[in-house]
Amino acid sequence: MVEVPANRARELTARGRIQRLLADPPRVAVLALCAVILGLRRAEALTNPQFWAEDAYFFQRAYVFGWNSFFEPFAGYLHTILRIIAQVAANLDPSRAPAIFVACSGAVTLYVAGRTLSERCPLPRFAGACALAVVLVPDTYEVFLNVVNLQWVLAAGLILLLVSRDPARGRQWAHDLAAAALLGLTGPFSVILAPLFAWRAWSRRTRASAVLAAIIFACAAVQVYCFCTEPPLPGAAPKDQRIAAQLFLPAVARRIGGSVLLGSLLAPDTDQYVGTAMGIATLAGVGYMAFRPGRLRAERGLLGLAFAAMLLGAFFRTRYTLGEYFEPLAHARYVFIPQLVAIWLLLLTAGGEGRPGRAAAALAVMALLLNVPRLREPAYVDMHWDRYAPRIRAGERVVVPVNPPGWVMPLPARRK
């Protein structure tokens, strides 16, 4: 009679250890798994690193103008973190420049994933699901492991800063101040999210939240000034300036609700009326998860508002090309944040009790399984960077082809 309780005690102890491990897994293990997933999704980026699109622009400007390039807006705003990476690459051996871009992009992505594991982050750490979500967003063509689109991953870091608890120690203060300044001056996202930081400061009424809001507003002011003073690029205005507003909701259905939940089962074509209904259902689902009563309602509300702000910002930016949301791989960067925030809200709901929690957990598992077949991203074309690196090292004038095919990077001669 004594052995049964003892065995049961040992079984419960082992189960307790597993539950504790899943509830708060080792940070290093989770980030290592994130790194493996990134490598599997973009394997050729590790075996044969190359520039993608405007990566060439950032390298070229750092190569030609050095630190002065930091003050040069691109697309209407500053890209401080991207300029730092380009400056490092331009001052080292040219043969390693694409690898530096890839390595830094991967490291920054892991930083954002790691922020979900912070003790100050309200997202559940169960099995590292929210960290893994950063690298498992299904619709990410041209987002991962390049510098030009790293700003979209960094926008997730800014949202995590928005929902995190105030700093309590010196190191936490240093992190939040530096992160707010660097992230705020990288891309237009400080402009989009500034009202939410203001609301956060007003509702918390703490010195830390007020200071953070002040930094974000200062960064937003700089970005707005850059946008208003930078001359338009030649040919930047689209020829067709009609807005197909009837595509808003079908685009939400296809690239957010449908992409996340249906994955590889998503039909290539959707009737507009069905798409509109699905779009409304997607927004209603996100709204319910964000604003339903219960634990962490304030933080979930901020995530819901960030979802709405980023989605509206994306649609405003692409208002003349909404049809491209229905083309394979197109506009993936614009839906990266809405997809990620929707997944985080789903995981927050799954961490709750009752039917909503069980339903959300089932949907999260289903979404993962259905998206596995489409997680591998198409490989870039080999542009043979190794042929041009010696000429760059020698300071010769050279025109380097980069991905996607047809793009080139002209570099002037540089005196050694």
Image: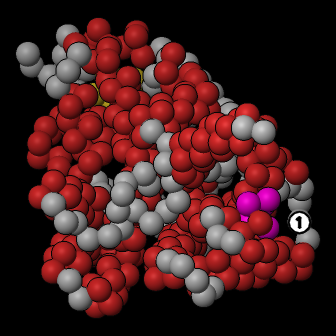
The answer, for residue 31, to whether it is visible in the render is no
Per the image, label 1 sits on a secondary structure element best described as: loop
Write the residue at 75% across / 74% down. Answer: 354
Q: How many marks?
A: 1
Q: In percent of the image, x 17 and y 46: which residue is there?
A: 69
Residue 158 is one of the magenta-drawn residues? no
Q: Where is residue 301 shown, x and y percent of the image? A: 51, 81
Q: Nearer the viewer, residue 37 or 269?
A: 37
Query: Residue at the spot x=76%, y=82% of the render?
Result: 280
Q: Which amino acid type is marked by label 1? A: Thr
Q: Nearer the viewer, residue 163 or 384?
A: 163
> Most prominent secondary structure in the magenta stretch?
helix
Compared to residue 338, the image places residue 55 above or below, namely: above
Q: Is residue 87 left or right of residue 155?
A: left
Identify the magenta region: 359-363
Residue at the image position 22 percent from the left and 61 percent from the top: 176
Q: What percent of the width, then of the height, locates residue 149?
A: 45, 48
**Residue to which mark 1 is pinned:** 270
Residue 388: quarter of image: top left
* Quarter of the image that includes the C terminus: top left
Q: Please determine whether, in this image, residue 252 is positioned above or below residue 70.
A: below
Residue 323 lies, in percent from the top left, at 72, 65
Image vertical order of residue 408 relative to residue 132, above or below: above
